[in-house]
Image: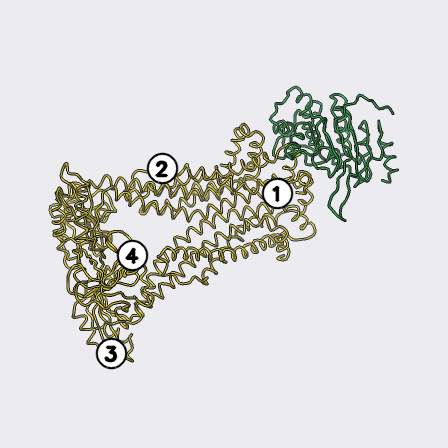
Amino acid sequence: MFRLAARSVQHNPKRLLLTAFAVALGVGLIAATHIFTDSLDRGFTRLFGEIYDGVDVIVEPVTSDGDVGDPTSGDSVGKDLDDAVVQTARSTAGVELAMGSTEAVGALIGTDGETLAGGSGFGPPTLFFNWTGVEDFDSATIVDGRAPEGDDEIVVDVGTAEAHGLTVGDQVVAGGADGTYPSTVVGTASWGDGNNTQGATLVWASLDRVRELRGGGDGWSVVHVRVDDGADAEAVAVAIDDRLPDGVRALTGAAKAEEQAASLGEALKAVDVFTLAFAFVALFVGAYIIANTFRIIVTQRTREFGLMRAVGVKGQQVRTMVLAEALLIGLVASVLGILLGYALAGGIIGLLKALGPGESFAVPIIPLDAVAWGFAVGIVVTVASALLPAIHASRISPMEAMRDAATQNRRGLRMRNIVGGALALAGAGLTTVGLYAGLERPYVYVGAGAVLLVLGVTLLAAQLLVPLAYGMRDLLARVWRVDGRLAANNIHREPRRSANTAAALMIGVMLLALTATVTQTVKSVAADAIGGQFTADLMVVSTTVPGSADDAVVADLASVPDVRTVTRSASLDARVDGVLVPVTVLDTATAEEAIAYETEPAFAEIDGGVFVSPSAIEAGAEVGDTVTLVGEDGEVTLEVTGEYPTSGDGDYFVDFAQAERLGTTIDVWQYSIVAAPGADVDHVRADLEDLVATDYPLLTVQSPDDMLALANQLIDLMLAVITALLSGALVIAMLGVANTLLLSVTERTREIGLLRAVGARRRSVRRMIRIESVVMSVFGAVLGIVLGVALGVALIRALEEFGFETVTIPWVLLGVYTVLAILAGIVAAWWPARKAAKLDVLEAIAFDG
Amino acid sequence: MTTSTTVTIAASMRGGTKDYGSGDAAVRALDGLDVDIAQSEFTAIMGPSGSGKSTLLHTLAGLDRLTAGESWIGETQITGLSEDKITQVRRDKIGFVFQAFNLIPSLSARENITLPLDIAGRDIDPAWFEEIISILGLGDRLTHLPAELSGGQQQRVAVARALVARPELIFADEPSGNLDSRSGAELLGFMRRAVKEFGQTIVMVTHDPTAASYSDRVLFLADGRIVDEMREPTADRVLDRMKQMGH
């Protein structure tokens, strides 16, 4: 049977070409994801190994939960280590050398006030380390000049020096949260072997300077330990760990490297899952096309199968043969797909390397899991999709061989409609339950309902879409006369085929419309939030490290002419009944004026108590009750004096006086500025900008419009990424339309020949195919848009508690998608239309269909 | 045998030559053939397999191109015309009836009949349409799809389609070849009536002497040339002639 299948593929490779390509595209996306993250994973594993290579044991703070701070932001969750910890490490048996190290996040500023690196804005951080002089601990070697000695001397990494044209002797300014310090560049250093800093700017300075940049204190971020020759690092790590107080731990450098690589692996897994989801969407769409192709092929070969059955081939053997053909296609397409994925991943990595941030990628190889996934998915999807057509083929009776090829075996759509209707109803029901039954986590129900609804509608499309398209027959006939009528007839003739083809497109467009609806709504909600919530004229925000809660900052900002009030918004973590909760801290006296919080009563009446959000109320808090907040170094029991209307902005709201009693770091993320009435806001802004540029380089001044633009930019970026990922599915859907048309042209060869014989011009034949394609595409797109918007609205309703109250329908984007669908229809019809128009009239008439 | 000097020529060919393939493998299907088709006459083309009769029909009708020679439909020389122009000639001046697969499966009988007019964007003459339908006895079959019609009915629809546009010429390729003898006789009778009553010109290729006997004039083809012709044929005379040709 396999030989026969191979023969059949060999005999007519063209009709399977697009199918194979569709599978390959889906497999390619999956393989590319694996190859990409594998390369990144290996790159980072190598990097972490390099960083901790010379350090035998590391002593670092941990929180009571055992969390370690985010290694890339330099923001450690635990507290600084004191000298006693260094002493403990130093006095442990087997330790040759133990030294504390301190790091700070800051900014590097030119003497002209222009920020060179770090400071406000996004991107890799600028990190300051104290120079220990121990090469293994610094992970750096001086390239030019010398190590920093005085407090106003610094060494920058060679990459940064090159990027900003800094040489030994240049003057710069080191900036921290609380102040700026003029410094001299006395040297450049290479970090590790290749100065592979991932784009971060590294600066080495004196211990005192780093501590100042850090905002004071005399502790250490981490203690590096070198063990005696011959001592076992692991044993030493255990010995140190045993002697350390709570909240501090010791582990080997190798273990730390492994831990970091693993935590990065976790993060990459999330990326994996995200992109794989889109690859699966692409394959799901691809499955429609494969099933469709095999269905058409089986119909076309009805006579052939009938003949086989007549000469004694069993139905089961016919089925095996069709499946073997599918297996063959799946195999070839998987190999192609994996290679395609390799090229795709390599291309993206190459692009990233060319653009800058790609240095952490290892040379891409095809990892085993990419091969395994590629083959598994490619073959399973192809064979599973071919299963129904294969079963259909096995049921062809020997009599079919005798019948006229034009006699079609029309199977009823009843079963399909029943199953589709049941699924759609179940889906709609589940969605409704999720929306209105008031259950917990309604989005789970809405999500599951949506999947069922889509499957159901796909099946129903044959009943829904085809009569709709056929209903347009008169309109099409009026506009394009007989071409239009024939196009409508062709769609109507094979309702399953047309519906499946349109459904592939429908799913792609549906996801696009869903994304567009949700993002557009998020955008308008953000606009409302930013425009409506912040009545402040300007905001001073910190985008790298949290701003200081120091009164001095407030006083400095308030001293700018025409600034009426400065209101700090901050957050901290505390526990209520043992559960970690987000707490928002505000200057409550002026909060009402700076930020249009609609609280009950006004924030100014907080009276040393606490305001609670709906989620806190759900957890049991009520006005008049008391709530106990437990911080790192203290706890407060406060009366609930008011309510905050929405969730998502923090569960509990307190003023700074109460927050300071918790002994927890208060992270200020915004200083809202209200200008004096009648003041020129632009003027105030310029003054504030001058102030922060010199004194607080990590802060930046923004207007509400800037914030909105930034939020929109992020949302647009997300939309663009999702659209790009979905485009794979859309290309596959377009291939599906082309494939169906191509096979249908082959099937209708004689008919087209006849049309040409009785006087239809080539142009007219081409137009007929094109109309057919566009009508199918547009109906698929319109159905997709209707479904996508409906599901988007449902999803937004389900997320109402997060502040999504009004739905914004993205009309412009939906219009664009419809136009794109028309274009897709025209493009998809290109090859089939050409093929149909080029048919030789005589050969076509004589064609044995 | 008298030859009228006043006949109008509906189609003609001079020195018609058609080669298939090239070099040693070349086959000459038409070999410098001259022919005139008179208007309002029912012409049958006969000959053994491979004599070139189908090629003659196809080249005369503009479905295929001559390798050498010239041919005309009425006053229009079609050799040398572009594909689009030839298609237009076919659309406006010619009707076709094939042996099988004459109809578009997705169109109803009525839509199939009006197809050439629809393609040309011409209006239907309702009286003429009704007349054809009643003669061919298709009145109660117009809304049916081809698959719902018998073989004879399908061929009658094809004839109706050929007639409805009032073409200068109808070319028929074994129109009764797939029908039982009764349906075949019926169909050929209709075609003959079309010639006699409406002055329609028909050229038909057939290998069946009975079918040929419905025509006014039979052309005998052998090896790409016209070797004989017969006026007022009967089935027996045609059969005798064919036997002489070694058929």
Residue at which label 1 appears: A746
Q: Are marks 1 and 2 in contact (CB under 8 Å)?
A: no
Q: Secondary structure at mark 3?
A: loop
Residue A212 as seen in the image, left or right of residue A351: left
Residue A450 as seen in the image, left or right of residue A186: right
* One can see residue A646 in this view: yes
| Residue B16 lies in quadrant | top right
- Residue in the image at 61% along x and 24% along y: B122
Question: As displayed, is residue A695 above or below residue B83?
Answer: below
Residue at which label 2 appears: A809
Judge the density around disc 4: few (<14), some (14-19), many (≥20) Cα neighbours within 10 Å: some
Q: Are marks 3 and 1 in contact (CB under 8 Å)?
A: no
First-in-chain label (1 vs 4): 4
Indicate the chain on which mark 4 is placed: A
**Residue A16 vs residue A653, the one in the foreground:** A16
Residue at which label 4 appears: A124
Of circles 2 and 4, the one toward us is 4
Indicate the chain on which mark 1 is placed: A
Residues at marks 3 and 4, CA–CA distance in whole angstroms: 38 Å
Residues at marks 3 and 1, CA–CA distance in whole angstroms: 82 Å
First-in-chain label (2 vs 4): 4
Q: Amino acid at mark 1?
A: Thr
Judge if badges 2 and 3 mark residues of a common chain. yes
Q: Amino acid at mark 4?
A: Pro
**Residue A224 vs residue B88, the one in the foreground:** B88
Residue A151 as seen in the image, left or right of residue A21: left
Residue at which label 3 appears: A94
